[in-house]
Every structure is written in C-alpha cells, then in structure tokens.
Image: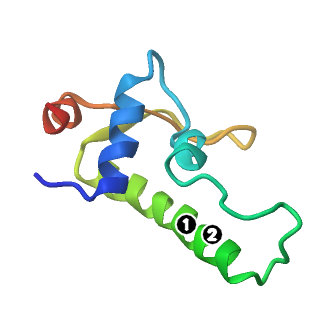
Amino acid sequence: MTLNPDAHELLRLIAESPEPVAASSFFHTIHPPNFPQSAPEDDPIREAWLEKQIGLYGEVLKLHEEALLRIVHPANGERPDLVEATDAGRAVLA
C-alpha cells in the first residue's frame, strides 16, 4: 500500500510513540504554522494551513479505515481518541 506523504508521516510518528497518542498532537509537527500569530483569520496563508490541518484529520480516518491504526482509548469529552499503529500499519512503514 502506498501512502501520501502526510499519511506516511502521521503513521510513522504514531508508530514511534511508546504509548497510545492523540493523532492530532502531531499535526503541527507535520505542518507547522507558517504565518505570524497576528495574521488575520482570513489571511490566505492561514487559510491554506488550516486546510492542511483539516486534511490531516481525514488522513487519520483513512488510516483507521485501512486498519493501519486502531483506537485504543475512545475520546471521552476531555481528550481525543488515543491511537496506535497496528501490525499492518508498521508493515506499511517497513
């Protein structure tokens, strides 16, 4: 299976985590903010970055649907789902 660069990096970071982790904790690592904090909400650079962040949520769903990661602890209203890579997910990275 071939993953796009964002999905590959997300799966790699999750697989390297020693314990279940919120996938979203890696979103800024993959696509760090590239605009000043003072940039207005409608700044095109900020909007493009936001689209990338939203796209990463989509990648998490795809990885889950493909059984490359699994939810170990479902979200509980105080924290998001905690996930880990499956054996199939680790195999894709090898």
Q: Nearer the viewer, mark 2 or mark 1?
A: 2
Q: Is residue 64 left or right of residue 60?
A: left
Q: Is residue 83 above or below residue 6?
A: above
User: Could you tell me which residue is drawn at 41 percent across and 52 percent down?
Assistant: 60
* Amino acid tagged 2: Leu
- Looking at the image, which is closer to me, 78 or 59? 59
x, y percentage for residue 84?
A: 39, 30
Residue labelled with disc 2:
50
Whether the residues at callouts 2 and 1 have beta carbons within 8 Å, the answer is yes
The C terminus lies in quadrant: top left
User: Could you tell me which residue is drawn at 69 percent across and 38 percent down?
Assistant: 79
Crowding around mark 1 (Cα neighbors within 10 Å: few <14, some 14 to 19, many 20+) is few
User: What label does residue 54 carry, if any?
Assistant: 1
- Residue lying farthest right? 38
Q: Is residue 23 above or below residue 37?
A: above
Crowding around mark 2 (Cα neighbors within 10 Å: few <14, some 14 to 19, many 20+) is some
x, y percentage for residue 42?
A: 77, 84
Q: In this view, does 71 lie to the left or right of 76?
A: left
- Find residue 69 and report its image quarter: top left
User: Could you tell me which residue is drawn at 28 percent across and 54 percent down?
Assistant: 65
User: Could you tell me which residue is drawn at 55 percent across and 43 percent down?
Assistant: 29
- Residue lying farthest top? 18
x, y percentage for residue 64?
A: 33, 49
How far is the residue under mark 2 from the one under mark 1? Answer: 6 Å
* Amino acid tagged 1: Ile
Q: In this view, does 52 lie to the left or right of 59?
A: right
